[in-house]
Every structure is written in structure tokens, then in C-alpha cells.
Image (cartoon, grey):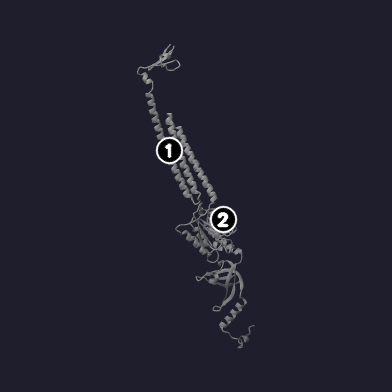
């Protein structure tokens, strides 16, 4: 039963409120200078000053927790509502309100399953919005002139990417250095993606890369701000985060996912050796096409050739050979020039297409000139043949017969030019017929 005598005993010590609060504070802080507490985050508030306030709870109790700005900036992950975590810190009391709290010095996941639960939740939400659909994927350019890389400037990732690009297809590389882990990394990465997309002269390809690490180290690439910035990028984006077995949410939204940063460099560039072979094959095809067209033109000219006197024929044949040789030299020079220019390996697809178009135009022009030459040649040849035929006809002996003369021939057809040559029989040819004499 309650002892009323003890309760009213004037010898019981009397304390001020502050004395009791201080005593409790000393007892609590002395007994819990360093402690690890596991619980679920609730009532999360991130203050504009950078301080983080939340509760840790389980089925039977709730403890207030505070993480000050200087500590929060070094956390690998931030607390999220409903996340099960383990905090490290010390218990302290706040005597003005007679409550106690844990001052957080470190924060980690209660287990990998907790973080993966958040990963899957975000993935499903973003997937439901359609951010991962293949119809949003942009093609990676075959021959880039400029590549931008978002990564840390201190790690080996950027060096590996540059080295691989230099081996395959040397081109301009821009580094946008960012923090790739820890508090605030997600903001830096998202800002870098947005800033590159706002450049006046934009790169052809954007690579977001980072080396391997733990799930916590790579977590900034699972943040929604990074995923949405990658989705909004107008520049084709290749993600290369961690090792081949590592998967982050930016991989689902990027236009192409590379298993490693080195692989990203390979996906972004063509192989200069293969490109040289293709260009050589293309040059050979163009050369064969030009030669075949030239041979066809020469064949047409030979087919359309008409009978004419020997001297005129030889002259025109010589002119035709000179023309053919000149055309062959022109086409050979064009092809040689094209091959020398493309072997520089800095030619791009548009320039090659323009050169081929120009080459085809020149071929069409030469073809038209050759057709014009052939038409003029054929017309002149026909006129010359006609004139020669008329000249030959004017000198024909039959015109002499019409003036009263006759030709005496043996029965064998040979002309008799003197009376000594006349023997038994002969044929006398007049303008209107032949008379046989026996």
C-alpha cells in the first residue's frame, strides 16, 4: 500500500526541475555514448538548413532521430519513408521538453533487401509511366564527331574511355566532371545531362559512366531526378554504370546500356579498320561501275559505226581512242582522289555521300558529252560518206558511156585497150546495154 508517511516525510530530498533533467541527461548519455539502433523510418522531414529529422519505430516503440547537416552531407544514402535502416549514434536528452533522441552519426541499410525493395518500387512506378518503352530509344550515330562523357575526373573511367576511343575511331571527347557517389551526386549528374542538352553545339553521343561499387555507391543512378533527366535527353545516351552484373534505373531509360565504360566507348564509335575496309570496297564498286558504264558507251559507239572510207575511219577511230583514254584517266583520277581522301579516317558519312553524289553528277555530265560527241561524229561521218559517194559517182565510167563511148571487154571481163589485144570474141558495153561479138 501507499506509504503516506514517507510521502510527507520532510527529510526526502527536494530537487529543482533543471537538476532532475540534468541528472537524467547524464545517466542516459553516460549509459549510451555509442549505440546502433535498427528500425523503420517514419515522419521524415528534410529541413532547408540541411538537417534531417525522423522517427525510428518498431512494433512496440518510437525514438526520435536527428542527423545534422555536417553529417547528412556525408551519408551514402538518405533515409526514406518506410525504409528499414540501422543508425549509429548516441542517445541524448532535450531537457526543455523532457524527451530524448538519437544523434545520428552514420546510417546504413538494415539489409540489401530493404534497398532492393525501394529499387523495385521505383522501377515499377517509372515503368508504369512508360519511361522504359523501346519506342523512346534513340539510335546511336554510326560515325560521331563529338562525344561527351559524364563521370568523375579523378577515376580511371574517363581514361579508359578515351583510350578505347583513340584506338577505334579518334574524335573529339568532352569531359563533364561530376560527383558519382554520395549525397548530392544525383543532382550533379542530372544537371550535367540537362546542361549538355542545352549547348549550342551539341555532341553526337552522351556517355554517363562510373566504375564498380556497392549498391550504396551506385545508388545515385537510381534516383528519380537522374532517370528523368536521362529520359528527357535529346542526345542519344549510353549508360555504363559499374560492372556487367550491376543494374541501375538509368540503364532502363538510357538509349543503350553498356556493361562497362570501355564497352560504352566501343558502342559509341566505329572500328577504323573495318571502316577503312568498307570505304575501300565502296571505292572499288564505284570504280567498277564507272568502268562498266564507259565500256558500255564504247560498245554503243562501235555498234553504231557506219561503213566509210579507210582514211576517215582510221582518223575517227583515233579520235575515239583518245576520248576513251581521257575519260578513263578522268575517272581513275577521281577514284584515286576519293580513296586518298577517305583514308584520312576523319571523313563522315555526310561528306562521303556528297562526294559520291558529285562523282555521279560528273559521270552523268561526261555521259551526256559522250552521247553528244557520238551524235556529232555519226552525223559528220554520214555527211562525209555521202559526199565521197557523190564524188565517186561523178567519176564513174558509166557517165562516159552516156556520151557515146563504149567499153570493149573479153568474155572474161577484162577491158581490151588496143587492137592487138582483140581476138575472136568480145563484149561491147554501151550505156544502154552490152553487145556480144563472136
Q: Which is more toward the observer, 223 or 39?
A: 223
Q: Position of residue 216 (x, y in %)?
A: 58, 64
Which residue in the protein does label 1 denote?
Answer: 370
How many residues crowd around disc 2 within 10 Å: few (fewer than 14), some, or many (20 or more)? Answer: some
Which residue in the protein does label 2 denote?
Answer: 263
Location of residue 159 (image quadrant): bottom right
Looking at the image, is mark 2 or mark 1 nearer the viewer? 1
Q: Position of residue 262 (x, y in %)?
A: 56, 57
Location of residue 400 (image quadrant): top left
Which residue is farthest left?
403
Residue 234: mark in rendering: none
The number of numbered discs placed on residues in the rendered structure image is 2
Asked whether, in this view, residue 190 is left or right of residue 392, the answer is right
Q: Position of residue 94 (x, y in %)?
A: 56, 77
Look at the image and tell me whether residue 329 can be seen: yes
Look at the image and tell me whether residue 257 can be seen: no
Which one is earlier in the sequence, the residue at label 2 or at label 1?
A: 2
Marks 2 and 1, how far apart in space? 53 Å
Amino acid at each position: 500500500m501507499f506509504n503516506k508517511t514517507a510521502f510527507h516525510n520532510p527529510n526526502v530530498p527536494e530537487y529543482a526541475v533543471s537538476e532532475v533533467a540534468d541528472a537524467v541527461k547524464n545517466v542516459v548519455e553516460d549509459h549510451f555514448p555509442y549505440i546502433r539502433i535498427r528500425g523503420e523510418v517514419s515522419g521524415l522531414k528534410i529541413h532547408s538548413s540541411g538537417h534531417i529529422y525522423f522517427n525510428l519505430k518498431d512494433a512496440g516503440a518510437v525514438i526520435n532521430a536527428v542527423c545534422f547537416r555536417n553529417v547528412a552531407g556525408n551519408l551514402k544514402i538518405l533515409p526514406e519513408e518506410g525504409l528499414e535502416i540501422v543508425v549509429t549514434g548516441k542517445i541524448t536528452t532535450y531537457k526543455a521538453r523532457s524527451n530524448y533522441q538519437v544523434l545520428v552519426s552514420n546510417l546504413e541499410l538494415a539489409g540489401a533487401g530493404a534497398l532492393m525493395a525501394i529499387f523495385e518500387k521505383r522501377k515499377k512506378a517509372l515503368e508504369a509511366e512508360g519511361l522504359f518503352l523501346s519506342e523512346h530509344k534513340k539510335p546511336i550515330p554510326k560515325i560521331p564527331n563529338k562525344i561527351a562523357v559524364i563521370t568523375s575526373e579523378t577515376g580511371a573511367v574517363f581514361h579508359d574511355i578515351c583510350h578505347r576511343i583513340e584506338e577505334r575511331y579518334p574524335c573529339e571527347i568532352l569531359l563533364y566532371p561530376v560527383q558519382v557517389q554520395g549525397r548530392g551526386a544525383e543532382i550533379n549528374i542530372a544537371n550535367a545531362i540537362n546542361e549538355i542538352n542545352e549547348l549550342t553545339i551539341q555532341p553526337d553521343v552522351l556517355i554517363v559512366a562510373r566504375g564498380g561499387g556497392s549498391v550504396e555507391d551506385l545508388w545515385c543512378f537510381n534516383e528519380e531526378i537522374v532517370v528523368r533527366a536521362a529520359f528527357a535527353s535529346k542526345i542519344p545516351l549510353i549508360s555504363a554504370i559499374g560492372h556487367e552484373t550491376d543494374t541501375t534505373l538509368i540503364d532502363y531509360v538510357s538509349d543503350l546500356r553498356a556493361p562497362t565504360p570501355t564497352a560504352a566507348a566501343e558502342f559509341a564509335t566505329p572500328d577504323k579498320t573495318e571502316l577503312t575496309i568498307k570505304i575501300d570496297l565502296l571505292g572499288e564498286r564505284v570504280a567498277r561501275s564507272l568502268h562498266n558504264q564507259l565500256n558500255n558507251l564504247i560498245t554503243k559507239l562501235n555498234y553504231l559505226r557506219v561503213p566509210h572510207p579507210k582514211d576517215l575511219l582510221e582518223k575517227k577511230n583515233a579520235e575515239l581512242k583518245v576520248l576513251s583514254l581521257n575519260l578513263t584517266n578522268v575517272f581513275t583520277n577521281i577514284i584515286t582522289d576519293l580513296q586518298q581522301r577517305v583514308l584520312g579516317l576523319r571523313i563522315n558519312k555526310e561528306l562521303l555521300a556528297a562526294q559520291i553524289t558529285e562523282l555521279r553528277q560528273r559521270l552523268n555530265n561526261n555521259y551526256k558529252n559522250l552521247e553528244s560527241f557520238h551524235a556529232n561524229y555519226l552525223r559528220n561521218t554520214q555527211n562525209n560518206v555521202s559526199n565521197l559517194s557523190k564524188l565517186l559517182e561523178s567519176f564513174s565510167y558509166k557517165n562516159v558511156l552516156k556520151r557515146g563511148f563504149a567499153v570493149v571487154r573479153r568474155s572474161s571481163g577484162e577491158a581490151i585497150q588496143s587492137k592487138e589485144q582483140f581476138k575472136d570474141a568480145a563484149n561491147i558495153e554501151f550505156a544502154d546495154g552490152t553487145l556480144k561479138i563472136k
